[in-house]
Amino acid sequence: MSLSAQKLQKFRSKAYQLLGRAKDATFDLMDAVLITRNIYSFAELSLSPVFRRKWPSLYEAIEDCRPNRNKLTKLYLQQVPKNQRVILAGDHTPWPRTEAPTLKDRTYEHGAKVISGKPVTLGNGYSTLSWIPEDKGSWALPLRHERITSFETPITKAVFQLKQVGRHLEVRPITLWDSEYGCAKFVQLTADINADKLIRLRPNRCIWGQPKSVQKRGRPRKHGDKMKLSDPTTWAVPVESIEINDPTWGIVKIQRWSQFHFYHSPDQPMEIILIQRQGKGLSQKAAKPMWLAWIGQEKLSLEELWKYYLRRFAIEHWNRFVKQRLHWKLPKLGTTQKGQRWSDLMPILTWQLWLSLDAFTLHFKILKRLMGKEQNR
């Protein structure tokens, strides 16, 4: 047995022990999900050849299992290499439940379904914090995937998840966030967490510089000149500007401003990064500028910051994958607690796929070599 296969087997054995009750039925359910591409109802998973029980056991597994989320997080982090910088990405995605009016603790979420002419849906929001393992690729490996209750916000849940993961990391990670987290509240709540942050900003956001002069009387000023990102006439002079000719993105212009802050977090200085694609023939979407805020202990180059943030889009690929291929939104479960238990299985499934990648690649190469020898005879 290869080392990669042994690693996968060891992971499955440890994950099995952390499922609480109904381990066998729950593990059969996960194996059925992994090998079943298309289904129209949750009960169809019971027809899978790897599910050794009757269809009621599908629902009994979700009812009885109790995945230990904290210990599972430690198990996931044990698979992260120790000799590289850890890149984490956070995101918020909805599980629409418009057809379940009696489901407790539903919240309004941004979604594709339209209610009263607005892109809003009813259901449960889920916050995900993932490890991004590759410089280029679509793999995002979730460390925490949890429901956002009606007493929480996506920001407070993301801060909680970052604290839970950060205390098990030996090195300071770089974390990547969408514009939903580009506000003073998130910056303040994460100020004491041992993590660097690269956050996208909304294009209509306003930021403030440092006060230029020292007052002799009165309270010292906290804010300097206002910079409105959507109004170039208010922009300060950038401290650095470069152009990169990238084979994929073409000519990209990147600029940096230092010592800016949000109005309600003047004690948290940020570097502001503007990324613009150059050239003719770009679509309106491609030509749209992207604003980032960098809060970190070290000064990274503009190209590094841009390339780091491009890795964040892997978590959006995972959101689509978990909904379309792992059938996350398919079961119509009666309680939010069952929904959370089912959602706790999604990271386990993703990590199994990632750990099996090397083993299947090796077996494919061996099979290809053997087939080549047979053809040469």
Image (cartoon, rainbow, N blue to C red):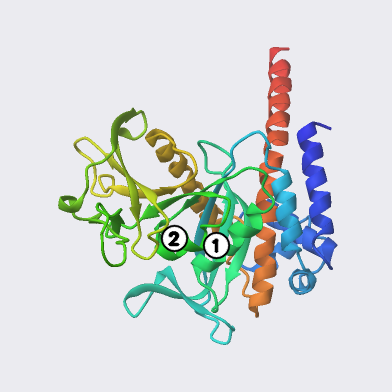
Circle 2 packing at 10 Å, graded few (<14), some (14-19), many (20+), is many
Q: Are marks 2 and 1 in contact (CB under 8 Å)?
A: yes
Residue 323 location in percent, x, y? 55, 60
Disc 2 is placed on an element classified as: helix
Residue 142's label in the rendered image is none
Q: Residue furthest bottom?
A: 102
Q: Is residue 142 above or below residue 305?
A: below
Q: Residue at x 44, y 60 (%)?
A: 181
> Nearest the camera: 80 or 227?
227
Instruction: Note whether residue 40 is visible.
Output: no
> Nearest the camera: 62 or 37?
62
Quadrant holding the C terminus: top right
Q: Residue furthest top?
A: 377
Q: Which residue position holds label 1?
A: 158
Residue 55 location in percent, x, y? 76, 70
Disc 1 is placed on an element classified as: helix
Q: Amino acid at mark 2?
A: Tyr
Q: Is residue 187 above or below residue 119?
A: above
Q: Residue at x 31, y 76 (%)?
A: 117
Of pointers 2 and 1, the one earlier in the residue sequence: 1
Q: Residue at x 15, y 51 (%)?
A: 233
Quadrant holding the N terminus: top right
Q: Which residue position holds label 2?
A: 181
Q: Residue at x 26, y 41 (%)?
A: 238
Q: Amino acid at mark 1?
A: Ala
